[in-house]
Amino acid sequence: MTTGNNSAAFPAINKRNDRIALIAGQTSWTYTELNQCIDRLASGLLDQQADLAEERIALFMPASVDYATALLGIWRAGGIAVPLNVAAAMPEIEHVLSCARVTRLLVSSSPDIDADKLSSLSRLCHTLDIALVDTEQLLHAELRAMPSLPLQRRAMMLFTSGTTNKPKGVVTTHRNIRAQITTLLTAWAWQQEDSIPLFLPLHHIHGIINVLCCALWIGARVTLFPKFAMDAILTQVEAHHYSVFMAVPTIYVKIINHLETLPAARRQEICAGFRAMRLNISGSAACPVKLYEQWQTLTGQTLLERYGMTEIGMGIANPYVGERRAGAVGIPLPGVNVDLFDEQGKRIAEEDVPGEIRVRGDNVFLEYWDNPEATAQSFVDGWFCTGDVAVRETGYFRIMGRASVDIIKSGGYKLSALEIEGTLLTHESIAECAVIGVEDETWGEAVTAFVVLKSGQDLQYAELKSWCESRMSPYKIPKTLRVMQALPRNAMGKVMKPALKQL
C-alpha cells in the first residue's frame, strides 16, 4: 500500500524481502513482516486522514520491534517522530512533550518498562491532554494508501542532551535523515550480510541512525536488547553472531573489566568473536587512547572513532580502509563539508591551530523547534557552528572539546580538558576522570581534576602532581584534585560537567 515515491520508504523494507530484519529474544521478523507491521501501524495512525501533516507523535519504548515499527510508521504516515528517553525522570519527559506539543504518545506492553513509570506517564499525558496509545491497538487497522512525502518534510525531533543548557528540540527532515544514513552506508561499507546488536538508547542519534536505520536501509540484521545485557551479548559475540559492533567508550570499558573476571579460555573465545568482526566503532564520547590501545591488544580490533552530534548526525570519521588514529576522530565523511574557524569567524587553513568545527551538508538539521533565535545563532553563512573545538593534524581532526566546558583558558593558554583527561587515565590508580576549569583570580581558570579511583587505591594531590610533571606541561597540571565515588553521566555516558562545576 506504500506509495512508490514516499521518502519515508527504506529500500530494503519497501520491497518483498524474506531476509531477517530484527531479532528479539527467540523471535525474529523478516523485512516483509516488518513492512507489513509498519503499514498497519501507519494506517492506524492515519485513521481517516490522508496525511499526518507533521503531527508530533512521541515514542516511549526500548529497543524492540514495536519501536522500529512505530518510528518508521510515523515517518511513513507523514508525522514527526519524537523518541523519548525511557530512563528519563518525569519532569524531563514533561519538558519534551510540552516543548514539542505532542498530541499522541505511543507505548508498548514491553515487560522492560516499569509499571509505575507507565502509570506516572499516563497521569502526565492526562494532564497535558495527550492521547496515550498502545501500538497493539494500531496494528489491526484497515490498510490505507500512504501519503507522498517530499524530502523537505520534517520527520524527527530529538532533544539535545542538555549537558550545557536546557534540552532543545532538533528537527531533521527526511532529506537530512536520508543523507545521514547513506553517507554512513558508503563510509562504513554496510552490507546486507551484516549483523549488529542494538543496545544503545533509542532517543539518541547513535542508536537510531548509526545502528537501526543504517541496518534497515541496507537490509542487514539487528538483534534488539532493551538495555546492555553483558552476558547475552558476549555469548552471541563468542558465537560469531555479529559482524559490526557499535558502542560508547563506557561500554567498552565495562566489557574489558568483565573479561578480566572470566576464565582464560572463555575470555579468548569472546575476544576471538570480536576479532572476527569487520568493524568495531566507538562514539558519543571521546575514546581515551588508553582504552583504544587496550581494545586493540585484547581483540585485534582497531576501533573506528567518529564525531557527530544530534544536529548533524555523523560528520567526521576515521577511515574504514586506511589509517585510524588513536585520539583523532578522522576526516570529513562523504558529502559532508567540515572546516575550522577562529574566534573572528575566519577559516583556519593552518595545521595544529585550534578552531571551532563548522559543518555544511544535507545531513545538517533544519531548525531548533519553536526557537528561531537559537537556530539563527547556530548558523553563520550557511555553516552550522558546532561549539566544538578541534585541531587538524595532517588532515585528521582531533577534538579538544566543547568551547564552553572542555576548553580551559588558564594562564594565557587554551587547554584541552580531553587531552589532560587522556593522560590522567594512564595513571595506575585512576579508573575514570573529568577535568574542568574553575574560575580563579590568578589563573583565570584553574585546572581541576575529578577522579574515580580503582578499588583499593588511594591518591593524594602531591602524588598526582609529581606524577604529572614528567607527562605534561606545567600549565596543564591540575591545581586541584577531587576524588569521587562516581562521575555524573547522562544516558549516553557523557560526563555532566556543569554538575561538576556546581561542586
Image (cartoon, grey):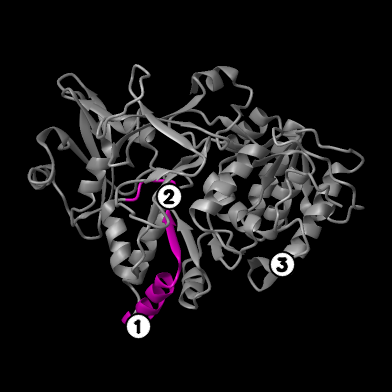
Span shown in magenta: 264-287
Mark earlier in primary sequence (3, 1): 3
Residue drawn at x 18%, y 18% is 441
Mark in front: 1 vs 2: 2
Q: Closest to the observer: 259 or 184?
A: 184
Horizontal side of 360 relative to 222 (left or right) equals: left
Residue drawn at x 61%, y 29% is 366
Circle on res. 29: 3
**Residue 358 in the image: above or below residue 283:** above
Q: Do the residues labelled 2 and 3 touch (CB within 8 Å)?
A: no
| Residue 486 horizontal/vertical position (percent) | 34, 48
- Reply yes or no: does residue 351 show up in magenta: no
Q: What element carries label 3?
A: strand
Calculate the distance from the C-alpha at mark 1 to the C-alpha at mark 2: 29 Å
Mark in front: 3 vs 1: 3
**Residue position marked by numbered label 2 in the rendering:** 283
Q: Closest to the observer: 37 or 135?
A: 37
Location of the C terminus by quadrant is: top left
Horizontal side of 242 relative to 97 (left or right) equals: left
| Residue 485 horizontal/vertical position (percent) | 31, 49
Badge 3 crowding class, 10 Å Cα cut-off, few under 14, some 14 to 19, many 20 or more, is: some
**Residue position marked by numbered label 1 in the rendering:** 265
Calculate the distance from the C-alpha at mark 2 to the C-alpha at mark 3: 28 Å
Badge 2 crowding class, 10 Å Cα cut-off, few under 14, some 14 to 19, many 20 or more, is: many
Horizontal side of 328 relative to 196 (left or right) equals: left
**Residue 335 in the image: above or below residue 194:** above
The amino acid beneath tag 3 is: Trp
Residue drawn at x 64%, y 48% is 117
Badge 1 crowding class, 10 Å Cα cut-off, few under 14, some 14 to 19, many 20 or more, is: few
The amino acid beneath tag 2 is: Gly
